Image: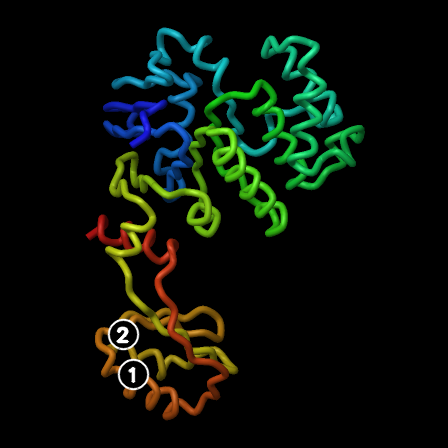
Amino acid sequence: MAESCIQVKDLTKTYADLTAVNNISFDVRTGEILGILGPNGSGKTTTLKSILGLIEFDKGTVQVNGLSIKKERSRILTDVGAVLEGARNIYWHLTPMENLTYFAGIRGMPKKNIAERAEYLLESLELTDVASKEIRQFSAGMKQKCALACAFIHDPSILLLDEPTLGLDVEITRTIMDWLLDVVEKEGKTILITSHNMDFVEATCKRILIIRKGEIISHETVRSLKEKFARKHFVVDLTTEPPETLLESISTLGSVSAHGNSLKIELDAVEHLIPLMKAVERAEVDMTDFRSVENDLEDIFLEVIREEEK
């Protein structure tokens, strides 16, 4: 098992009467991508900002590469990059190359190394063709790629990302996902990600934390979570929204939810399939599709949250 490059122990942070993070402990292993999931306000961003030393926490310890963030923050940040709150860490009236040159300079990089490093990042993030255009002209996805490049200009071994794909289209999300997987595989980087994008987390992270109300309620691999909560549900697509009479008649068969013209049903027993189909027939609505689907990470996340609330 790889050594831990980030160690968080008994971390607690309060704001007046609100406990944003409540006595949490975890580690991040060298060379992995660790995901942190949780509802809004669960403490994800507070955790990242505590690791970076951007906020002063009340209790606990944070160590990065064996150093205390409270005592040796300057040394730690020489080997850490971060993108928080979208693309706010870059200057929109500068070009990507100008931003990269600026951030390389304040990171203390030797001038002779800056151009080569900047060109590498522009190429790997597909920004070469726009390297001389002002960032204010870019889409949200292009701005986010520029922010990633700037956070990575000094070649840190650790990267912290807060919602890196928020509001981005599928193509840009895939580009960022592939780039992160590549730098971990080829360069041995370590990445800590918070995200609401379950598909993105499942594709990039082998291990995830689930935080609710400032506390860790699950700390497992994606694989073990899927094994624990492995279950199929059925999806019935109709030509119209399901009538209330249909919803009422099948509510005793299992857990039912409606999404537009589709019904999602987790049957209590496979024998309930026949009553389900008969109920759809009695409702006199046309069915366009019927399929079974295994629980994905979003289903599992919601179930973990529901279990905790019981």
Query: Nearest the camera: 121 or 304?
Result: 121
Q: Does residue 161 appear to the left or right of 300 in the view shown?
A: right
Q: Residue furthest front?
A: 186
Q: Which quadrant of the figure contains the N terminus?
A: top left
- x and y percent of residue 238 in the render? 48, 81
Q: Earlier in the sequence, mark 1 or mark 2?
A: 2
Q: CA distance from mark 1 to mark 2?
A: 8 Å
CB under 8 Å between callouts 1 and 2? yes
Q: How is the image coloured?
A: rainbow
Write the residue at 24% across / 55% down.
Answer: 228
Query: Nearest the camera: 2 or 66?
Result: 2
**How would you rate the neighbour count of disc 1 (Cα within 10 Å): few for under 14, some for 14-19, many for 20 or more?**
some
Write the residue at 29% across / 83% down.
Answer: 273
Q: How many marks?
A: 2
Query: Nearest the camera: 310 or 217?
Result: 217
**How would you rate the neighbour count of disc 2 (Cα within 10 Å): few for under 14, some for 14-19, many for 20 or more?**
many
Which residue does the numbered mark 2 point to in the structure image? Answer: 267
> Up-down: is 139 above or below 269?
above
> Up-down: is 108 above or below 204?
above
Label of residue 307 in the image: none
- x and y percent of residue 6 in the render? 35, 23
Say which amino acid is labelled 1. Leu
Write the residue at 34% across / 41% down.
Answer: 207
Label of residue 273 in the image: 1
- x and y percent of residue 254 in the render? 26, 73
- The answer to which image quadrant residue 105 occupies is top right
Say which amino acid is labelled 2. Leu
> Up-down: is 256 above or below 126?
below
